[in-house]
Image (cartoon, rainbow, N blue to C red):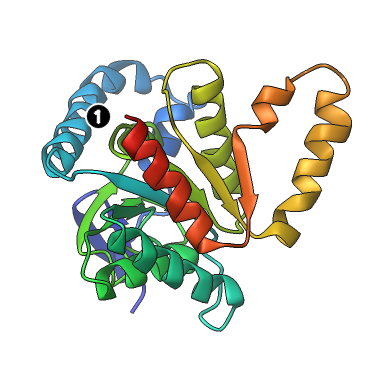
């Protein structure tokens, strides 16, 4: 059955709205009623932060795992996500994902089956419905910026599986926060050498060559196919704290 998650609200059948809360907040075109309603949205935004902080305050060391929602169950990246989720909880970390299907589901499944804490931070989208079944703790956000704050605040590092626009968004936001020293000692690992090498080649050959970044910016990434290397990187950073 088709459904849509809107914060704590589930919509089904003809009750499904075809716009999102973020979209309505950011789209100032059309009638001017947004001038009068936006101040009240602050209370809903505040509630999302309160809910997130309250739910995750006692979480302990955690790693955020990102990857494509479109990853099929029989794709090698799905198996890699399961292995990563299990290895992280065996090393004493909770696993936080975006709560969706695909690679996110795989990491949540590995963490849950490994006996660890499996967290899903979902988002209201027009084409995804709720959290995957392996997110044992789940929060569905209306606003991307509230959700992103939870990822960064409660994660000690990012592990990034092959993914698309959303994955790239989270990846480069993390890099920007480290580069600008908004967060410190924040390891970022990319799993999938073949998948990510083209991006690295472009960063070195174009962006770095044009002087728009420094070599130290590229050095923030660890590119690997080895789950054990990722776990060792995250564990070393935890001990360094």
**Residue at image mark 1:** 45
Looking at the image, residue 215 lies above or below residue 100: above
- Residue 85 falls in image quadrant: bottom left
Q: Is residue 45 visible?
A: yes
The kind of secondary structure element at disc 1 is: helix
The residue positioned 50% from the left and 33% from the top of the image is: 174
Looking at the image, residue 16 lies above or below residue 210: below
Q: In the rendered view, does 165 fall on the left or right side of 124? A: right
- Residue 20 falls in image quadrant: top left
The residue positioned 20% from the left and 39% from the top of the image is: 52
The number of discs equals 1
Looking at the image, residue 230 lies above or below residue 226: above
The residue positioned 40% from the left and 37% from the top of the image is: 237
Q: In the rendered view, does 96 fall on the left or right side of 231? A: left
Q: Is residue 101 visible?
A: no
Percent coordinates x, y for residue 12 in the rendering: 28, 68
Percent coordinates x, y for residue 149 in the rendering: 34, 31
Assign the N terminus to one quadrant of the image: bottom left
Callout 1 crowding tier (Cα within 10 Å): few <14, some 14–19, many ≥20: some
Percent coordinates x, y for residue 87 in the rendering: 38, 65
Q: In the rendered view, does 76 fall on the left or right side of 38? A: right
Of 126 and 205, nearer the camera is 205
The residue positioned 40% from the left and 62% from the top of the image is: 100
Percent coordinates x, y for residue 207 in the rendering: 81, 27
Of 146 and 43, nearer the camera is 146
Q: In the rendered view, does 196 fall on the left or right side of 241? A: right
Assign the C terminus to one quadrant of the image: top left
- Residue 239 falls in image quadrant: top left
């Amino acid at each position: 059955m088709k459904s849509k998650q809107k914060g704590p609200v589930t919509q089904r059948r003809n009750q499904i709205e075809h716009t999102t809360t973020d979209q309505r907040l950011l789209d100032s075109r059309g009638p001017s009623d947004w001038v009068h309603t936006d101040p009240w949205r602050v209370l809903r935004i505040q509630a999302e932060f309160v809910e997130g902080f309250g739910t995750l305050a006692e979480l302990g060391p955690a790693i955020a795992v990102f990857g494509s929602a479109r990853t099929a169950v029989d794709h090698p990246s799905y198996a890699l996500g399961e292995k990563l989720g299990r290895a992280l909880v065996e090393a004493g970390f909770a696993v936080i994902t975006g709560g969706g299907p695909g690679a996110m589901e795989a990491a949540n499944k590995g963490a849950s089956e490994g006996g660890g804490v499996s967290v899903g931070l979902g988002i209201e989208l027009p084409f995804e419905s709720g959290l995957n079944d392996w997110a044992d703790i789940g929060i569905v956000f209306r606003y991307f910026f509230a959700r992103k704050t939870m990822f960064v605040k409660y994660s000690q590092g990012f592990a990034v599986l092959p993914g698309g626009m959303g994955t790239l968004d989270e990846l480069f936001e993390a890099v920007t926060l480290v580069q600008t020293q908004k967060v410190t000692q924040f390891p970022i690992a990319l799993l999938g050498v073949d998948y990510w090498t083209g991006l690295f080649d472009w960063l070195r050959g174009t962006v770095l060559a044009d002087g728009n970044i420094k070599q130290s910016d590229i050095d923030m990434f660890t590119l690997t196919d080895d789950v054990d290397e990722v776990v060792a990187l995250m564990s070393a950073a935890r001990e360094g704290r």
